Image (tube, grey):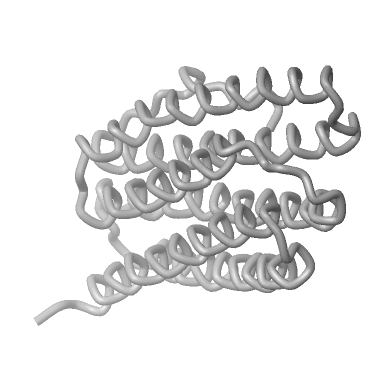
Amino acid sequence: MATRFERQLEELHVQLITMGSLCEKAISLSAKAIQGKGEELAQQVFDTDREIDSKEREIETLCMRLLLHQHPVARDLREISAALKMISDMERIGDQCADIADLSLFIDKNAVRVPDEIGQMAEETVKMVTGSVDAFVKTDLELCRKVIDYDDLVDGAFNQVKEKLADLIYQDMDAKVGLDLLMTAKYMERIGDHAVNIAEWVEFSITGEHRNNEHQMGGK
């Protein structure tokens, strides 16, 4: 029969999966918002961001209860501390999705064609968030390292967006709209960085070692 502590650890896994699902929802909605119907979808992103914030507080409370356990072993302490770091990055993902939703309200009014690469970045970052949380729950070191390597695809797509937008602005695209689209891509790239951070904390929870400064977020 599972102890109370073990049941709470299981609850932590469930709550992290829920928060990860909310992040995936926010990313997908924000990507759709810039494709059209910005106001309607943007509100859904803002609502989801608030759910993410609420879930972060719930998980923090649960982690505090786990830390107050009399004799958590080193492995458990790593898992709990990693979870606290993970939810911080998830909360930032929600914030950046909300930033994209804000931009969508202006992009939508100008009826411009959004570069396909931005949608690709959204799909890839959703996979990264899903993979990171799955790796934590399953204690899957190989999976979390795949997520870290996968960030190269997001960075590559961001560079393609920059080049494409530069060409479009040079031709006839309104410069402000072009910059809004560039910022959208930048937020997606930052979301990928946060997903990498999550994966690195998963790696720490498994191995006891953290990559520290190997992955830089450039002031994000």
Give 178 or 145, whichever is nearer the viewer: 178
Residue, far left: 1
Residue 75 % position (x, y) = 25, 48
Give 119 or 205, whichever is nearer the viewer: 119
Residue located 52% across and 39% down the image: 121
Give 191 or 111, whichever is nearer the viewer: 111
Residue located 59% across and 66% down the image: 52
Residue 183 % position (x, y) = 75, 36
Task: Give the position of the C terminus as an image quadrant.
Answer: top right
Residue located 28% across and 61% down the image: 71
Q: How many marks?
A: 0
Residue 187 % position (x, y) = 67, 39
Q: Where 211 sits versus 138, above or below? A: above
Q: Where 27 sits versus 9, above or below? A: above
Give the left or right position of residue 6, taking residue 104 as reference. Answer: left
Q: Where 14 sits versus 103, above or below? A: below
Task: Give the position of the N terminus as an image quadrant.
Answer: bottom left
Tell me where residue 104 sits by quadrant. Answer: bottom right
Residue 3 % position (x, y) = 19, 77
Give the left or right position of residue 189, taking residue 3 as reference. Answer: right
Residue located 57% across and 51% down the image: 88
